[in-house]
Image (cartoon, helix red, strand yellow):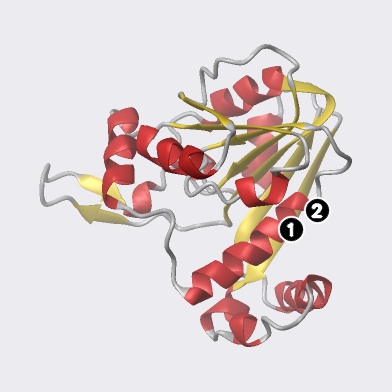
């Protein structure tokens, strides 16, 4: 199912949904996920692109660690981020980003791909912007069962949270099959038992590596991660 007017949808979404405030449980989980993401970024003076910047979490991680670029469909989000940070940002569609070829060392797309009509075309677009040896870091919900509600405005079935696609190892391999990548790596993150029972939050005092060991063990026993991470190396 496609979101035929997705640009307008996400502009309106940003007007009504506050990406800058979450509850303490979400903040703790997102902080763990963001730590996991930045562990893949090595060295300094990297050119880093964040696609679908939302609340701009990445700005607190890389202000002093390279050249950071933000893009989003929402002017409001980028404006609020830019008020606090002197970072280049642009309102643009992920399929047609206004950057030159082979520009970036790392491209991050976190919790965005599941909202996009043609995920393969987005990955193709990002691959063109990536330097040889660079990485695209994609996070999505894992193996999600897409649910639909009847919209009270248009009387049409509408996917919950505007999630159009579900992702796992097989589906991501299919999406990337036509691209010239050197490696494709997958990680499962944030076991649902761990998060639903709030054990993840109760263990917030643990350093990340210990928290991650518990999470990996739970995912081996009960294969129900919240988040799926794909690392595409060009």
Please say if 209 is above or below 125: below
**Residue to which mark 2 is pinned:** 39
Residue at left 55%, top 23%? 121
Residue 85 sits in which quadrant? top right
Element class at badge 1:
helix
Q: Are marks 1 and 2 in contact (CB under 8 Å)?
A: yes
Using residue 180 as the reference point, say whether residue 89 is left or right of it. left
Question: Percent position (x, y) of residue 150?
Answer: 18, 53
Residue at left 52%, top 80%? 196
Question: Percent position (x, y) of residue 192?
Answer: 58, 74
Residue at left 69%, top 17%? 128
**Residue to which mark 1 is pinned:** 36
Please say if 149 is above or below 185: below
Q: Which mark is residue 107?
A: none
Q: Quick one: quadrant of the C terminus?
A: top right
Please say if 233 is above or below 188: above
Element class at badge 2:
loop
């Amino acid at each position: 199912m496609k979101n035929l007017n997705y640009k307008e949808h996400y502009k309106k979404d940003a007007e009504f949904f506050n990406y800058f405030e979450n509850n303490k449980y979400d903040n703790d989980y997102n902080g763990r996920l963001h730590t996991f993401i930045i562990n893949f970024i090595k060295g300094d003076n990297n050119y880093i692109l964040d696609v679908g910047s939302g609340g701009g979490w990445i700005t607190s991680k890389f202000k002093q660690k390279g050249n950071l670029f933000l893009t989003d469909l929402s002017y409001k989000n980028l404006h609020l981020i830019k008020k606090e940070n002197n970072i280049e940002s642009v309102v643009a569609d992920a399929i047609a980003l206004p950057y030159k070829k082979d520009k970036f060392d790392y491209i991050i797309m976190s919790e965005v791909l599941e909202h996009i009509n043609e995920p393969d075309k987005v990955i193709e677009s990002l691959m063109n912007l990536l330097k040889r040896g660079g990485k695209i870091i994609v996070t999505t919900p894992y193996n999600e069962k897409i649910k639909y509600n009847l919209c009270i405005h248009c009387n049409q079935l509408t996917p919950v949270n505007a999630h159009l696609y579900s992702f796992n190892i097989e589906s991501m391999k299919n999406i990337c099959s036509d691209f010239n990548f050197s490696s494709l790596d997958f990680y499962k993150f944030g076991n649902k038992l761990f998060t639903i029972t709030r054990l993840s939050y109760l263990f917030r005092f643990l350093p990340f590596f210990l928290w991650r060991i518990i999470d990996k063990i739970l995912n081996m026993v009960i294969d129900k991660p919240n988040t799926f991470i794909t690392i595409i190396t060009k």
